[in-house]
Amino acid sequence: MQTIGERLEEARKRKGISIREAAETTKIRGDYLQKFEANTFEIDLPPLYIRGFLRSYARYLDIDPERIVNDYNEVLSEGKPVRRETREVYGRVDFAEAARSKDAAEPPAPTRAAQDQAMMLKFGLLGGGAIVVVVIIILLFKVIFSGSPAKSPSAAQQQAASQQAVVQAEAAQTLTLTATDSTRVKVVQDLDGGVLFNASLARGESKTFKKLGKLLITVESGKSLRMEVNGRSYPVPVDGYGRFALD
């Protein structure tokens, strides 16, 4: 009864195919095919892979793949010797085929395009990291030096502050106008132009105002008006009709 290897070898030679041609077509390493035909299955592969290779090789050689696999399973289960001397001289093996089989076992070397892509990726990562560092440095400088020196107050601001100080100093002052005879009086706040009083005072009538800064007073008859600031009497600078400022 023929062994697995004998049937494989006989079918291959009947088709006039070399080991190298069979390996190129089936994508199975040539040294594996040689061992299969030598009825040698002691290769560093799990039985599952060996069954798959035997099935593919049998289909390629137009013999029953299931019978080949069943025979292989029987060999495994019975523990029969699986080695025999091949009837094909090893001296006829093409060295180019052996080199191709070796290359199939080793991972392919990276191509130049893959090396260029890896180099571009490396430089891209380095460039992106440098940009991030520069942005962080700029943000730190902005945070550290964002405080600008305080601007010196303008002349208008200084004048307004002075007037406010004067107003605050005089805020406690009270102006009292008393009519010694009937007369008309108008009192205007110089600070904002507000009219504090504009009416006639009857004889003996008094009017009291909060004095906030300078006041502009217009009187119909100055001699008919008596003026006091915080209870202290001040002379009216006009006798008849006139206008004066009270600081």
Image (cartoon, rainbow, N blue to C red):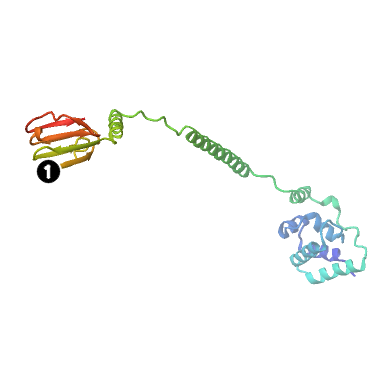
Q: Which of 180 and 192 lies nearest the eye of the viewer?
A: 180
Of helix, strand and loop, which one carries label 1?
A: strand
Up-down relation of residue 104 to residue 141 (above or below):
below
- The number of callouts visible is 1
Q: Which residue is drawn at 91% across and 58% down?
A: 85
* Left or right relative to 20: residue 236: left
The picture places residue 110, in percent across and down from the top left corner, at: 67, 44
* Left or right relative to 19: residue 3: right
Can you name the residue that lies furthest to the left here? Answer: 240
Q: What residue type is labelled 1?
A: Ala
Q: Residue at x 50, y 37 (%)?
A: 139
* Left or right relative to 185: residue 166: right
Q: Which of 180 and 8 lies nearest the eye of the viewer?
A: 180
**Is residue 134 visible from the viewing direction of this image?**
yes
**Is residue 64 visible from the viewing direction of this image?**
no
Residue 88 image-quadrant placement: bottom right
Q: Which residue is drawn at 82% across and 64% down?
A: 8
Q: Which of 88 and 145 lies nearest the eye of the viewer?
A: 145
Residue 2 image-quadrant placement: bottom right
The picture places residue 54, in percent across and down from the top left corner, at: 79, 64
Task: Name the quarter where the C terminus is drawn.
Answer: top left
Dot 1 crowding, Cα within 10 Å, few <14, some 14–19, many 20+:
few
The picture places residue 146, in percent across and down from the top left corner, at: 45, 34
User: Circle 1 sits on which residue?
Assistant: 199
Q: Which of 101 and 153 lies nearest the eye of the viewer?
A: 153
Task: Name the quarter where the N terminus is drawn.
Answer: bottom right
The picture places residue 178, in percent across and down from the top left corner, at: 15, 38
Q: Which residue is drawn at 78% across and 57% down?
A: 19
